Image (tube, coloured by chain):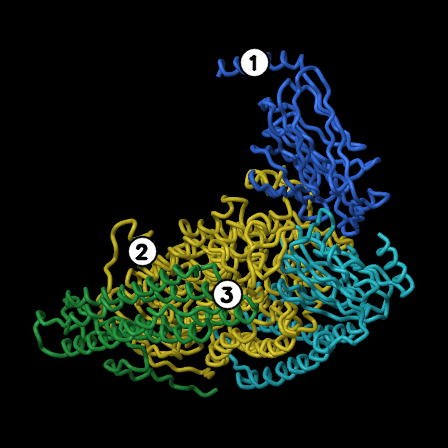
Amino acid sequence: MASTLHEPPQIDLNDVLGAGNGGSINIPTDGGLRSVLHHSPAPSSSAIWVAMFAISMMFAAFTSALIVRKGSSMDWESFALPSILYFNTFLLLVSSVTLEVARRRVDAFMRGARSAAQRPTSWLYVTLALGLLFVIGQYVAWQQLRAQGMYLATNPSSSFFYVLTAAHALHVLGGLGGLIYITYKLSKLTLRRNTMVATARYWHFMGALWVYLMLLLWFKL
Amino acid sequence: MHDMSAPVAHQHAPPTSFIRKYVFSLDHKVIGKQYYGLALLAAYVGMGLSWLMRFHLAWNSTAIPGLQFLSASGAPGGVMTPEYYLQLMTMHGTIMVFFVLTTAPFAAFGNYFLPIQVGAEDMPFPRFNMMSFWVTFTAFLVLMSSFFVGDGPTLGGWTQYAPLNAIGSVGGPGQGTGVVLWAVSIALFCVGQLLGALNFISTTLDLRVKGMSMMRLPLSAWSWFITSCIGLTAFAVLMPACILVILDHVAGTSFFVASGLVMNDQVLPHSGGSTLLWQHLFWFFGHPEVYIAIVPSMGIVSHILLANQRKPMLSQRVLIYSMGALAVLSYMVYGHHMFVSGMNPFSSLVFSFPTLVITIPSTIIVLIWTFSLYGSKLRINSASLFSLGFISMFVSGGVSGFFLAQPSIDIMLHATYFVVGHFHLVMGVAAMFGIFAGTYFWFPKITGRMMSEPLGKLHFWLSFVGAYCIFMPFHYLGMAGNVRRYSTFVDDFLQPLIPVHKFITIAAFVTGAAQLIFLYNLFYSRFKGAPAPDNPWEATSLEWSTATPPPFDNFGGKHPIVYHDPYQYGVKSSVGDYVMQTSPEQVETEFEEK
Amino acid sequence: MRTKSMLVGVSTLLMSSSLMFAGTVSGKVTFTGTPAKPKTIDMSKEPSCAKQHATPLTTESVVTGPNNGLENVVVYVSSGAPDDGQVPAQAVTYEQKGCQYLPHVLPMHVNQELKITNEDQTSHNIHPLAKVNHEWNKSQPPGTPAISEKYEKAEFISVKCNVHPWMHGVFAVMNTNHYDLSKGGGAFKLPNLPPGKYTITAWHEDYGTQTADITITSNETKDVNFTFKAKAY
Amino acid sequence: MARLFAITIVVIAILSAIPILRHTWVAPEDISTHGALIDEQMSETMAEAGISFLAAQFILAFFVWKFSNRAPDAKLKKFPGGAKGLVIGALLVVGIEVMALGLFGVKAWANVYLDAPSANAMPVQVQAGQFAFYFRYPGVDGKFGGLHPELINEGSQNIFGLDPEHDVDARDDIVAAEMAIPVNKEIHLLMHAKDVGHSFFVRELRVQQDFVPGLDVSLHFTATKIGKYEIVCTQLCGLGHYNMKAYLEVMSQQDFDDWLKKQAGQ
């Protein structure tokens, strides 16, 4: 049998693409926003996509449950969505815009040579406030429904309404936690760009998910 | 030669307090060990339950001394009641499927070895990882608490079919609080595993060291990665299903309870729910769950066989693609659990074909394993024996899938012991063999001590022959029409089969006792075993290139660099017939297989 | 504790002295109209029980006697009589034999011990559908010890065996010891009633309740009759 | 030890095959018109699965026997077929095998589930409840009375919740705890669940179908042999599941008519 020479691969130590990026090798210990920016490869850039996939699957399960449940029986009673939901939708969409502004400013701040005093946190606060208002608005929507006598167990349509909106609101609360976390990290100048990007993606996803849920509720309830 | 590795700084420093070091540890290795401990505890509880059940099936009116102290109403005078049998059965199934077969090969070994095998110092989200374990542990406590609350655990079986799972205590003992605790436990379990899967996937995708391309990942790492992908989808569907069941109980909704159902001459207050909805949601999780249990063991067994056969697999790629195909197909076949459920009969045919097709990747995997042994230099030890036993068990359990994949034959075999035999062999025993193989193989790395080989081999022989004696007759019982989930065989028809049940029970007691040898070996070797070298099996992957046991950051302040494919066996190098993945040495091979 | 038991002793003495001047209520429970024909119970599912009955059992929710007598009616003093407060020391026994409850209606006092035995070769399940009392559901495999229970509140409790749907009975848990179950031609007798005003209630599981007010002045026997309207279906 | 392993799996494989070859434990004799196809499909599958099982275990045993504990200087050898050969082989052999089984099985499935019952099939309703089956025949008027769940009272044996007081159709309905059917007559079984999920399984009839609470499903079959058979529940329905059964009496038409008359008289 012929011998083959098994060549060790040529590895460019600076090339982080294709063959593993070396994990969190280069996180500097001294902190500092710009050094974090320059030296930190994303600790995990895929995690946020993975999480969004799992959340999508969960809502897909709820959706299919809704469709099957609606088709299985004649007891489905449609009801008009509380009007505040449209306002809430607007709030959440605007918050996505403000977060995007915030993200760009933070990005520019990380790139630029501005001083720590000029941290662009105000747009983050605006986003936080809008997000919080959205959750409060959802709560108001529930109160309005309760006032109409539509409780969780009143009808399958109301059951699904509460379940879907509550599940979404919980995830939005998680997103608010993320926003608070990046605001804190920014104030400490230890924010990683990846964390910012991931949080922004998650927040936009919450907006998109809500639009989907609104359409679902609008067509199916 | 490892010194070319890059220097490293940690995300988190080694903890010093006892609590942070051993209890709420962020270290993936400690979490892996915690998962293993949980699985071990759960496995012995589950085995104990199976002993009680088997005893009752063989001698159903004989008292089991002391059982009345476990449940006075469930076992008056020590004689098991029908509902107590079902409660034990449900707990056996739930504990084994979720807390043993999912946690041990996937969460336990995966947590410990996935980061090491990709060369990372930890998972990317250590806090999520810690939560993953503690949420899972809480789930286990919640499940176990149902033994002591109200009228005991639920009796609805691990599949918890609707509407029995949603009508409340009117359905029988354990159907009130018991079901709620079950559903809460499983929902928590889903959260735990989703957090785990998130970490596993991002570890594999993002934390590979330099040189570690996806195709250079060891097969075990691949199997954990694929399993995480299955789990991510499956658990994300089961959790909403559990939430809906809980709401049916505590909030009075009607997701799963149809109208006009009558219990105890009273019409149930629910209305309009869909009972098939539960089955669809459950089996969309339930079938992939089978692969969540078995794919990690496939990876572990491949990994171990490679180190012991001293030559590469016939094709690494084909194995990976086949495991991937299993993962994808596993979502397209779930309907085969519902052939006679009242689902549209056309759907049964539609589901039957992918189910039959899934035998193709499974066959390819088995063929690659078997034919890779051809011309090898197989080493026989406890780990490789359990791996070979795994192949044998997987084949035996797999061929019965031919029958169950066909709706027409399923008419005769559905809900019989044939099904029980099938899944116990293919996902129960086979996955357990994977866990045992992994334990014998990795124990030296984890603890720094070798396990006793004579005891390991004794454990193997008793388990291997015992498992066949238990589960082969299950198939015969099923073919004769013995229905599963019966606590007593009152049918005239089943009387002649009771001797077979007695045989199985005796085999179960012997096989179960053999597992105590394993437990003894585990603890004995942990403290008294021979000290283990860094690479006792002359294996190539990254876990063997670091110290034994691995330091807190896995590679002692460095990150390794990977130069080779994962299984360079059968080569000529300075160390022998293999070359480590981390060795930059050029090697000559007289044997090349791609 | 001691004073309490002394008090109980004294009051018992007082009561037994009042019994010297006790009246009796007796009478008959009958029905008018045509009751539904009892249905035959098919126990073929449980051969070990089926073979114990030479002629198949029939439903026992309405049991009639000669001269339109109605059996299994619980007749009891529902108000007027001071609750004796005496829980009989002896337990009442409810027997499961041949997949049938014996007796069909079991009267008992609140907190009186209830013993349930299984004489069959099959596992039974006793599920009293209590609404006021604590509801429980227990299985009793053959050869296991008797189940011992008690009820704390007065209630008519429908009893079912979940394994054998035809098995059906009643626990009549009462706050009084003045009760009787109508037998044979529907006759009942409530002895030992001290002088006073009473409400006598007759309860039938299908036909409901009827009451009658009476006054007992001395050592007399009052005649009270109840008539229920039968349902054809 | 490797040789012991090889011998063990060969012995286990052979011992496992013996009861199957000797038909030690087999399904009871088929008494239905559709069952032959299922039985045929079963033995076809058994042959293919059995051969795969034995072949896989024997090859594994052979390789373990031959290639374990070899001398350190022994040469590694490559399997001549290579992975490609195995994959193509698996695709062809297993692929064709399972496709053939699948396609052939469609026929067996279809004549139970896809073909409609014939117009003159005799309707029988079965109601499954915890933990007994009850059967209902429409009586002389050929019509089933309506079901009123709120009227169900097992103590007085109103099992189906019929309302004979108001519903004329219900008055002559015959309710029985065992299922009598005439031989060689197609039965259209209407399946109704009273409470939770149950299943209707008659081994000899080659029939198994779940009851779906809230959704009535139906089955049709023809029994070809007079006798008494067991109907059992195969869907876990609660504590009395093990004891949920009834008897199927297949009778001559004459006996069946007499039986119906006797039941109607009760």
Residue nearest the viewer, comparing B406 with A201? A201
Please report, as a chain letter, where disc 3 is located. B
Please identify the quarter of the rendering in which residue B450 is found.
Answer: bottom left
Tell which chain the image draws in blue: C
Image side of residue B432 versus residue A171, left or right = right
Q: Which mark is residue C9?
A: 1
- Chain A rendered in what hue? green
Residue drawn at x 57%, y 77% is B358
> Where on the picture, by quarter, is residue C80?
top right
- Residue type at mark 1 is Gly
Residue bearing mark 2: B25
Query: Quadrant location of residue C86?
Result: top right
Q: Is residue B292 left or right of residue B509?
A: left
Q: CA distance from mark 1 to mark 2?
A: 67 Å
Chain for colour yellow: B
Q: Residue at x 40, y 49 (%)?
A: B527
Are the two marked residues, 1 and 2, in contact with CB atoms closer than 8 angstroms? no
- Which residue occupies the foreground of this view, B454 or B486? B486
Name the element at disc 1.
Answer: helix
Chain bearing tag 2 is: B
Badge 3 density bin: few <14, some 14–19, many ≥20, Cα 10 Å: many
Q: Which residue is mark 3?
A: B293
In the rendered structure, which amino acid carries the disc numbered 2?
Ser
Whether residue C229 is situated above or below residue D242 in the rendered picture: above
Front residue of C100 and B36: C100
In the rendered structure, the colour chosen for chain D is cyan
